[in-house]
Amino acid sequence: MEKNTLLVIVVAVLVVFAAVQAVELTLLKDKISSGEFRTGTASTTIAVASGAGTASNPSAGATDINQLSGMVGGC
C-alpha cells in the first residue's frame, strides 16, 4: 500500500471519528438544555481535618498565627 493511500485512510477515519463526537456532543447538549439528562444519585462523604494542630497537640488547630509550628516547609 502506498504511503499516500495510508495517510488518506487515517485522515478519513479521524474525520469520521470527529463527526461522530460532534453529533454525540450536540445530542448531549440538547438533553442537558431540555432537562432530560440525569446524573447518578449516589453520594459520598469525605471527612476533612479541621486544622493542622500544634506540635504538642496535633489534633487541635492553631487559633493564632504565632502558634504555628516553626518547622513548616523546612528540613
Image (cartoon, rainbow, N blue to C red):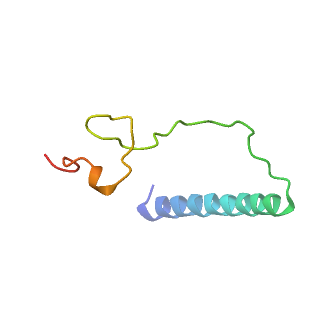
Residue 18 drawn at (x, y percent): 62, 62
In what quadrant of the picture does the N terminus appear?
bottom left
Question: Is residue 17 left or right of 68 when viewed as pictured?
Answer: right
Residue 6 drawn at (x, y percent): 48, 58
The quarter of the picture where residue 46 lies is top right
Pick the front one: 16 or 46: 46
Pick the front one: 72 or 20: 72
Query: In percent of the image, x 39 and y 38: which residue is there?
Result: 60
The total of numbered circles placed on residues is: 0
Question: Is residue 30 left or right of 2 when viewed as pictured?
Answer: right
Query: In percent of the image, x 33 and y 35: which residue is there?
Result: 58
In what quadrant of the picture does the C terminus appear?
top left
Question: Is residue 67 left or right of 18 when viewed as pictured?
Answer: left
Pick the front one: 44 or 60: 60
Query: In percent of the image, x 49 and y 62: which residue is there?
Result: 5
Q: Is residue 29 above or below residue 48?
A: below
Pick the front one: 31 or 16: 31
Q: Is residue 13 above or below residue 54?
A: below
Residue 3 drawn at (x, y percent): 41, 61
Query: In percent of the image, x 32 and y 34: which residue is there?
Result: 57
